[in-house]
């Protein structure tokens, strides 16, 4: 049963546009993440939040900005998308040792 | 740089055979190693995990073998089934709000 909800499932946009992805978890976890998964399935952590505070910010372009209104929500905004941003963006939350992933948002930049 | 390495990149076995997926890491401070299974169109899901104080963890057909001295792990899937066809990720928990994933092994189980 899914407990990490992401919207939208898919998004196609043109180079230079701005996009926003939403994520909500209903597990009551304090820690949330954004991961990027490329076409080869490589999973790279982008951001880590704990109780709506940014904890980890990996080396990602500045056009990516996470936003957290409370510990259950973690959104991702991309200003001026570029072709290399095409990927699946996975939101996740963590309790103790287990990470729970959403189904992802597939972004295609044309 | 913290890294988790996996091999092979792709593995094909026949139904009923044992699939062996390998993983190694560099940072000796890693102390917890989950394996995640991902099907197409889904996010990864926890399959089985082991802490660094153990050398073996078994759950049904899935077994992790852990060699702390060599910093190596392996996931054995016995009696492989076509439904096991998926991508398997070895990961390391850094206890620093960051879980590091390997590049994954794509497993294909042929009927």
Image (spheres, coloured by chain):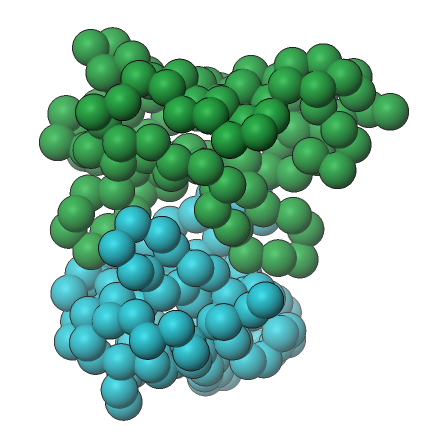
Q: Position of residue B42 (x, y in %)?
A: 62, 57
Q: Residue furthest top?
A: B70
Whether residue A12 is visible to the viewer of this picture, yes or no, is yes
Q: Examine the rendered structure and indicate whether residue A56 appears above or below residue B30.
A: below
Q: Find chain A in the image and tell me its colour.
A: cyan
Question: For this rendering, which residue is in front, A58 or A52?
Answer: A52
Query: Which chain identifier belongs to the green chain?
Result: B
Residue at (66, 57) in percent of width and height: B41
Left or right: residue B94 compared with residue A64? left
Question: For this rendering, which residue is in front, B18 or A92?
Answer: B18
Which quadrant is the C terminus of chain B positioned in? top right
Q: In which quarter of the image is residue B11?
A: top right
Q: Examine the rendered structure and indicate whether residue B34 appears above or below residue A75.
A: above
Q: Where is residue A91 in the image (x, y as percent from the top left)?
A: 43, 66
Whether residue A82 is visible to the viewer of this picture, yes or no, is no
Residue at (21, 79) in percent of width and height: A52
Q: Which residue lies furthest to the right in this view?
A: B111
Which quadrant is the N terminus of chain B positioned in? top left
Residue at (25, 10) in percent of width and height: B70
Total label count? 0
Left or right: residue A96 compared with residue A43? left
Q: Quadrant of residue B14?
A: top right
Q: Where is residue B91 in the image (x, y as percent from the top left)?
A: 36, 37
Left or right: residue B22 compared with residue A69? right
Q: Where is residue A25 in the image (x, y as percent from the top left)?
A: 41, 76
Q: Examine the rendered structure and indicate whether residue A80 appears above or below residue A85.
A: below
Residue at (17, 28) in percent of width and height: B27
Q: In which quarter of the image is residue B94?
A: top left
């Amino acid at each position: 049963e899914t407990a990490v909800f992401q919207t939208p499932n898919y998004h196609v946009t043109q180079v230079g546009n701005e996009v926003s992805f939403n994520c909500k978890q209903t597990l009551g976890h304090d820690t949330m993440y954004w991961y990027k998964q490329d076409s080869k399935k490589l999973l790279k952590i982008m951001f880590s939040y704990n109780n709506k505070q940014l904890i980890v910010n990996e080396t990602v372009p500045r056009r990516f900005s996470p936003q957290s209104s409370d510990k259950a929500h973690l959104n991702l905004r991309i200003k001026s998308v570029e072709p290399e941003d095409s990927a699946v963006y996975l939101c996740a939350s963590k309790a103790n040792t287990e990470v729970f992933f959403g189904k992802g948002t597939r972004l295609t930049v044309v | 740089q913290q890294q988790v390495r996996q091999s092979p990149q792709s593995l094909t076995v026949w139904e009923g055979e044992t699939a062996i997926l390998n993983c190694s890491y560099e940072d000796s401070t890693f102390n917890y190693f989950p394996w995640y299974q991902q099907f197409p169109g889904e996010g990864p899901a926890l399959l089985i995990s082991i802490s660094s104080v153990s050398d073996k963890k078994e759950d049904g057909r899935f077994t992790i073998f852990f060699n702390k001295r060599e910093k190596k792990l392996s996931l054995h899937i016995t009696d492989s089934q076509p439904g096991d066809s998926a991508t398997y990720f070895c990961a390391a928990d850094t206890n620093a709000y960051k879980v590091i994933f390997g590049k994954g092994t794509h497993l294909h189980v042929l009927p």
